[in-house]
């Protein structure tokens, strides 16, 4: 034990006597470990954010988003088409489309129509402009939204278009900081709505919300879509006021003719996701008189695509990190080999004074272990710091996991061990009477 | 003694258990060491044999004292005892005041004395010296030979290789080598007679 300690001491002495060499050796390991940790952190962070988005959108969904085609587009298509300059007329995305989809798509699980009304809510002297969204109960289910208080809409509410609503958490905090909002009324636009439920807060990074085109659910007021159509504006119906507006202002300010803004469909079997979305596309095209005033997205497929690219990316990252670690290991091997050769004389002297093979091996092992351990530690620190720096500057989510640290450490020690073993076995494992004997003989020591 | 290439160093290597013979046997204190495993050979080198080289072969990073105590490390002696012993032996070769100096701060003669102290520190029965005065001037050589005389008087066997007649004149037994074999092996009559 004493002897091992002494060998350790000798090794330390050798390291500190040759600080520059030790540092150069360690650099390979430092950067190797740092690279592995940082890259794993980036890869893992990306994976996490995709999983988070997956959870947000739910599985097996097809989203249909209505939009109003550009005026010029419509104009150009009408001029090339040998028709009158009337633009093609589409009824827009309506509840009838929903019914048609429900009839046609075989393995449909749920449909969730959404209708957005930008308005403001007033209660007890507080005013907030927000969005009232007409939905059905399926909306909450598809988006994995839970209630913290109260109930979802009842069948009766929906059938009769009752003036009830479910509010987001932020709305509750704004209007009902202390009291229980259930049963209270709030005025949205010109309609008083009775609150029947409060949603659980949904935590999601604003970035992933933006990426998925999902609103911040927390600051919305939800009401049955039937209520919205009945008591708010039904854009599918042309009223006298609309006509008046059009004449008065020439170009109509609000030309959104879609009854619904969004429609989300859930399919039972993910296998038919793409096929179903194709069917929906054809159906809507026919129903909308060949005018594509909607956009069909299958977020899951998009994400899957993204995930695949991410995986390839991760693999490449891992390979690069592995190579840098390997190069670091080769660096250690190189320097250990050089130092063994350079110190053959020292080994000879020590052997002549009674050191056995083990002593020499320990001495060089400690040297290698020490360098790579210190290098590994510095590498871990550097890796974690660079992961954090990347996260804050490049806005890439990074997650440093304990196992990535362990893995890189393990890799570095493994490479160090193998690389150390080679030069050392070259000089120490041979018996004095074998290939390297001449190095241990007196005249080579004296020369 | 013998011309260059006659096998003197080779013989020393064999005697010092740094090398094992291709054929033939080597008995040291009635034990056949030619077939011993490395660990045992290391032990024999440590306990029975002290080496002195032409070019001193001290470890440059260590002080004289640490260099001298090195063989004790490999025989597993605690640090305080090691240093005490090393200091004693350094005093024997007259270098107490240079204990903390590194080899490159010492003269050739001083370095060789440190090397001798290192060879002596484990109280070996045999000292092997391969041209120990080869790098030294005549005056220092004489000082070194003086130290060897003292060691011899204390009861050690000293085997010394040299090219110089006046160094060889110190020896009690003269072996001449030629082409890898012993050419002559004679008593040094003058010294033996004086002692008688
Ligand atoms: N008995 C022997 N058997 C086999 N090889 C021998 C023998 N004697 C000498 N040799 C070979 O001769 C070569 C020179 O021997 P060695 O180095 O011992 O000479 P030396 O007497 O020490 O010379 P120098 O005076 O220059 O130091 C070595 O390569 C050694 O292998
Ligand atoms: Mg020789």
Image (cartoon, grey):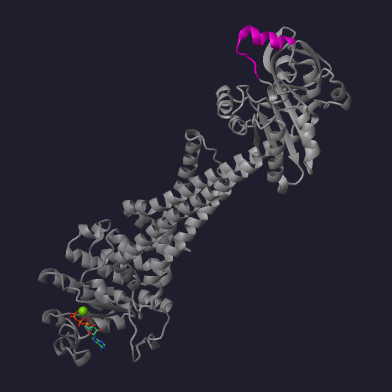
In the displayed structure, B65 sits above or below A376; it is below
Quarter of the C terminus of chain B within the rendering: bottom left
Expressed as whole percent of the image width and height from the top left, the position of residue A328 reads 41, 55
Quarter of the N terminus of chain B within the rendering: bottom left
Instruction: Specify whether A179 is left or right of B105.
Output: right
Expressed as whole percent of the image width and height from the top left, the position of residue B162 reads 17, 80
Q: Main secondary structure of the magenta part?
A: helix
Front residue (pair A141, A292): A292
In the displayed structure, B106 sits above or below A393; it is below
Which residue is painted at 66% across and 30% down in the image? A65
Instruction: Specify whether A78 is left or right of A227.
Output: left
Q: Is residue A197 visible?
A: no
Front residue (pair B56, A244): A244
Q: Is residue B112 magenta?
A: no
Front residue (pair A247, A81): A81
Asked which quadrant contains residue B155, the reply is: bottom left
Expressed as whole percent of the image width and height from the top left, the position of residue A345 reads 29, 68
Residues rendered magenta in the picture: A240-255
Expressed as whole percent of the image width and height from the top left, the position of residue A226 reads 81, 22
Q: Is residue A251 magenta?
A: yes
Q: Is residue A103 visible?
A: yes
């Amino acid at each position: 034990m004493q002897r091992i300690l002494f060998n350790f001491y000798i090794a330390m002495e050798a390291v500190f006597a040759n600080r520059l060499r030790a540092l150069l050796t360690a650099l390979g390991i430092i950067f190797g470990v740092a690279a592995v940790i940082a890259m794993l952190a980036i890869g893992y962070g990306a994976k996490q954010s995709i999983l988070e988005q997956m959870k947000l959108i739910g599985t097996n969904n097809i989203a249909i988003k209505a939009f109003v085609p550009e005026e010029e587009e419509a104009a150009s298509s009408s001029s090339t088409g040998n028709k009158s300059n009337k633009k093609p007329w589409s009824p827009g995305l309506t509840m009838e489309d929903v019914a048609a989809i429900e009839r046609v798509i075989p393995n449909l699980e749920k449909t969730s129509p959404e209708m957005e009304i930008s308005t403001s809510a007033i209660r007890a002297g507080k005013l907030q402009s927000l969005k009232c969204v007409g939905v059905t109960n399926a909306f909450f289910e598809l988006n994995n939204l839970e209630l913290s208080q109260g109930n979802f809409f009842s069948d009766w509410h929906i059938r009769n278009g009752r003036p009830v609503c479910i509010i987001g958490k932020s709305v509750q905090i704004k209007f009902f900081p202390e009291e229980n909002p259930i049963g209270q009324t709030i005025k949205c636009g010109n309609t008083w709505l009775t609150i029947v439920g409060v949603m659980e807060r949904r935590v999601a990074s604003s970035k992933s919300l933006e990426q998925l085109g999902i609103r911040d659910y927390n600051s919305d007021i939800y009401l049955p879509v039937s209520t919205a159509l009945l008591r708010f504006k039904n854009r599918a119906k042309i009223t006298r006021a609309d006509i008046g507006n059009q004449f008065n202002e020439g170009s109509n300010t609000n030309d959104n003719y879609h009854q619904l803004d969004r429609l989300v469909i859930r399919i039972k079997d993910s296998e038919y996701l793409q096929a179903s979305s194709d069917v929906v596309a054809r159906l809507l095209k026919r129903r909308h008189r060949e005018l594509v005033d909607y956009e069909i997205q299958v977020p899951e497929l998009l994400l899957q695509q993204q995930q695949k690219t991410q995986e390839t990316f991760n693999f490449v990252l891992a390979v690069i990190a592995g190579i840098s670690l390997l190069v670091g290991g080769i660096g250690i091997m190189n320097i250990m080999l050089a130092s063994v050769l350079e110190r053959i004389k020292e080994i000879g002297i020590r052997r002549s004074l009674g050191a056995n093979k083990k002593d020499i091996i320990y001495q060089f092992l400690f040297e290698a272990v020490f360098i790579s351990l210190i290098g590994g530690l510095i590498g871990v620190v550097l890796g974690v710091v660079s992961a954090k720096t990347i996260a804050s500057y490049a806005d890439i989510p990074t997650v440093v996991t304990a196992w990535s640290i362990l893995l890189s450490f393990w890799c570095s020690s493994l490479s160090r061990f193998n690389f150390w073993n080679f030069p050392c076995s070259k000089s120490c494992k041979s018996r004095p009477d074998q290939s390297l004997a001449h190095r241990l003989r007196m005249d080579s020591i004296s020369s | 003694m013998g011309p260059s290439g006659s096998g003197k160093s080779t013989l020393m290597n064999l005697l010092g258990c740094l090398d094992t013979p291709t054929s033939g046997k080597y008995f040291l204190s009635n034990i056949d060491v030619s077939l011993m495993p490395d660990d045992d050979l290391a032990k024999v080198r440590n306990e029975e044999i002290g080496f002195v080289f032409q070019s001193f072969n001290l470890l440059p990073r260590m002080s004289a004292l640490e260099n001298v105590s090195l063989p004790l490390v490999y025989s597993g002696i605690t640090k305080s005892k090691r240093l005490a012993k090393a200091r004693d032996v350094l005093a024997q070769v007259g270098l107490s005041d240079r204990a903390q100096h590194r080899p490159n701060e010492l003269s050739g003669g001083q370095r060789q004395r440190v090397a001798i102290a290192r060879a002596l520190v484990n109280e070996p029965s045999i000292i092997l010296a391969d041209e120990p005065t080869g790098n030294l001037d005549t005056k220092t050589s004489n000082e070194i030979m003086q130290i060897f005389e003292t060691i011899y008087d204390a009861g050690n066997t000293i085997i010394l290789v040299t090219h110089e007649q006046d160094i060889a004149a110190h020896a009690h037994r003269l072996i001449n080598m030629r082409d890898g074999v012993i050419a002559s092996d004679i008593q040094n009559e003058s010294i033996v007679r004086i002692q008688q």
